[in-house]
């Protein structure tokens, strides 16, 4: 699938909560697929350097013992994303999912992006 629109999210998660985060992500993925998300990717910090001015952990004000997580959801178009976002915000399950999140969602940041380049290798 060539990406038509992407929502990107960056958050800090306690490293000790990795298993809970994975379970929570799997539960959220089922909901997101139901409302129209084409693809969901969750990435756990692995090789992230500390920056002098800014970096992933500074961006989310990560505390001691927390790691950065980058997630994205792909949609066929911005219109599909807008429709999915509207369904997401109207569905009471969304509140329940975020109440169960094993991290501080207040320090998460996100945004929608129109892809400029989508090149895939073999």
Image (tube, rainbow, N blue to C red):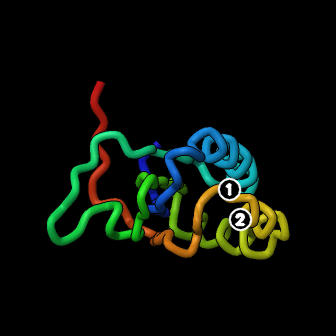
Number of marks drawn: 2
Which image quarter holds the C terminus? top left
What residue is at 45 percent from the left and 55 percent from the top?
A: 66
**Taking 47 as reference, is 59 above or below it?**
below
Categorize mark 2 by other alpha carbons within 10 Å: few (<14), some (14-19), many (20+): some
- What is the x, y in percent for residue 111? 45, 72
Relative to residue 105, is residue 54 drawn left or right? left
Residue most toward the top? 122
Which of 23 and 113 lies nearest the eye of the viewer? 23
Sooner in the amino-acid sequence: mark 2 or mark 1: 1
**Taking 28 as reference, is 61 above or below it?**
below
Categorize mark 1 by other alpha carbons within 10 Å: few (<14), some (14-19), many (20+): some
Relative to residue 39, is residue 58 drawn left or right? left
Q: Which disc number belongs to residue 36?
A: 1
How far, Cα to Cα, is label 2 from label 1? 19 Å
What residue is at 56 percent from the left and 47 percent from the top?
A: 40
What residue is at 65 percent from the left and 55 percent from the top?
A: 102
- What is the x, y in percent for residue 58? 32, 68
Q: Which disc number belongs to residue 98?
A: 2
């Amino acid at each position: 699938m060539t990406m038509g629109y992407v929502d990107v999210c960056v958050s800090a998660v306690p490293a000790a909560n990795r298993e809970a985060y994975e379970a929570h992500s799997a539960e959220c993925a089922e909901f997101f697929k139901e409302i129209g998300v084409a693809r969901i990717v969750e990435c756990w910090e692995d090789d992230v350097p500390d920056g002098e001015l800014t970096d992933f952990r500074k961006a989310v004000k990560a505390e001691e013992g927390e790691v950065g997580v980058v997630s994205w959801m792909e949609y066929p178009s911005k219109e599909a994303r807008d429709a999915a976002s509207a369904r997401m915000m109207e569905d009471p399950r969304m509140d329940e999912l975020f109440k169960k999140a094993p991290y501080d969602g207040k320090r998460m940041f996100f945004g929608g992006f129109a892809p400029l380049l989508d090149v895939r290798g073999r």
